[in-house]
Image: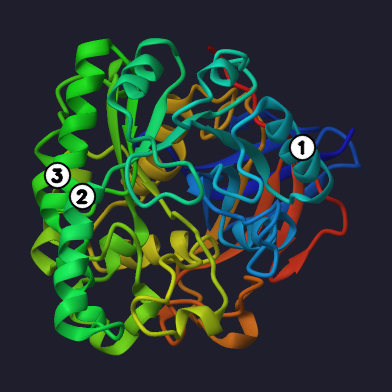
Amino acid sequence: MKKTLIKNANIVNEGTVFNGDVLIEGEYIKKIGESLTPKSPDVLVLDAEGKYLLPGAIDDQVHFREPGLTHKANIETESKAAIAGGITSFIEMPNTNPQTTTVEKLEEKFEIAAKNSSANYSFMFGGTNDNLDEILKLDANQVAGLKLFLGSSTGNMLVDDPEVLKKIFSNTNLRISVHCEDEATIRKNLEAHLSKYGEDIPIEEHPVIRSEDACYLSSSKAIELAKETGARLHVFHLSTGKETNLFTNDIALKDKKITSEVCIHHLWFSDEDYKNKGTLIKWNPAVKTAKDRDQLWEALLDDRIDVIATDHAPHTIEDKNNVYTKAPSGGPLVQHALPAMLEMYHKGKISLEKIVEKMCHNPSIMFEIDRRGFVKEGYYADLVLVDLNNPWTVTKDNILYKCGWSPFEGATFKSRITHTFVNGSMAYHNAKFSAVKYAKRLTFNR
């Protein structure tokens, strides 16, 4: 059995930072303590003095583009980028080609990940206007949850029939994750801008087209339906300050039926950045004002927002460089999400404990993931060692995404991920990857 002893680490876990040692045996954390010593000569001893040991981050919203869109990305390339960025588990979305809207297609994605993923994996099952029978076949302990597009969908995944929505909300105990933007509002705004500008709409108009009203109208309707039906609802990628007032912080996360998420790009960028970044920061929902960004931070820190994720959604640079109406929305983020949040720690914006809470603990609690997201004895040893004082700059040479670009290109981060353990094995160390993949399918305690 493989054994590793991590010595002298500053361990960040459950609201505290303490110096200690962690003994890994096989896939699991065997012992956490002080002055642990190896009991046999076959133990690999890793001195982590000065470094910080975090649970591996769990990203609850990624688009790895496989199957069908692999010219943009695939599970192998993007999962490697994820573990280089300290993300050891991911939940991937159903809008691939073909879409993940049948149990058969879901299992095909699991088979791909079992062969190719470097990070632990699960998938959302996609709801449509006509697949309730497939939703009812799902094993709640084997799938992360349901994803419904209430706006900005691909293919036939826009769920816009109120009766269907009510049936889905009423007939599943799985957490329902939703993209909330009101399509009618967006269409009206887009038509007005097309009349004024033609196809080449200034990118600065993106948050005007995909507006605060579009987001709030859709989010508030979803929450109203969840309250009416008793469904467990998770609202993805909040982008407006107004929406944050729809959520509460007065009960423990494990008891919350209605939860929310914010993404890295909405915490980092504002509409002031469109001038320099252009369509590279075109996302749906749109990056909005600095005031919205400040309000998102406020809600994150006071626990109205529960989770930080990436919505990693790569496109080719050629596609992104098109005019507004032809440039797709989305961008790659898994490699740089944790370094970006650690940069915010250096700026005094957020504590290490809160980063771990929002990126590691809370996704595990909310999705009821089995033994991950914490540094705890008996848990899987998904662990990340971070050097908080080892600056590096994002360049084309060190970007790992298949698409080859990042909205963070040119940014310098003070913190560096030096080691990533996946299920007890060192999967990444100082920019080098293990030739063996140690990832496992996520399971759930429901």
Which element carries disc 3, helix, strand or loop? helix
Disc 1: CA contacts within 10 A as few (<14), some (14-19) or many (>=20): few
Q: Quadrant of residue 5?
A: top right
- Of the numbered discs in the image, which one, if any, rests on residue 108? 1
Q: Is residue 86 left or right of residue 70?
A: left
Which dot, 2 or 1, sits closer to the camera? Answer: 2
Tell me what residue is drawn at x 70 percent, y 44 percent: 422
Residue type for callout 1: Glu
**Percent coordinates x, y for residue 277 in the rendering:** 33, 84
Q: Is residue 288 visible?
A: no
Tell me the quarter of the image containing the N terminus.
top right
Q: Nearer the viewer, residue 247 or 386?
A: 247
Residue shown at 23%/71% (left/top)? 206
Q: Gap between marks 3 and 1, in whole Å?
A: 36 Å
Q: Looking at the image, is mark 2 or mark 1 earlier in the sequence?
A: 1
**Which comes sooner in the sequence, label 3 or label 1?**
1
Q: Secondary structure at mark 2?
A: helix
Q: Nearer the viewer, residue 269 or 184?
A: 184
Q: How is the image coloured?
A: rainbow
User: Residue 216's mark?
Assistant: 3
Q: In the shown orientation, is residue 309 left or right of residue 437?
A: left
Left/right of residue 35 with respect to residue 416 in the rendered view: right
Element carrying mark 1: helix
Viewer-side label of 2, 3 = 2
- Of residues 27 and 168, which is closer to you in this image? 168
Residue holding disc 2: 184
Q: In the figure, 422 relative to 185: above or below?
A: above
Real-space Cα separation, disc 2 to disc 1, in angstroms: 35 Å
Task: Report the amino acid beneath label 3.
Answer: Tyr
- CB under 8 Å between callouts 2 and 1? no
Q: Position of residue 351 (x, y in %)?
A: 29, 52
Q: Inspect the image, locate mark 2, and give the three-letter code of the amino acid beneath it.
A: Ala
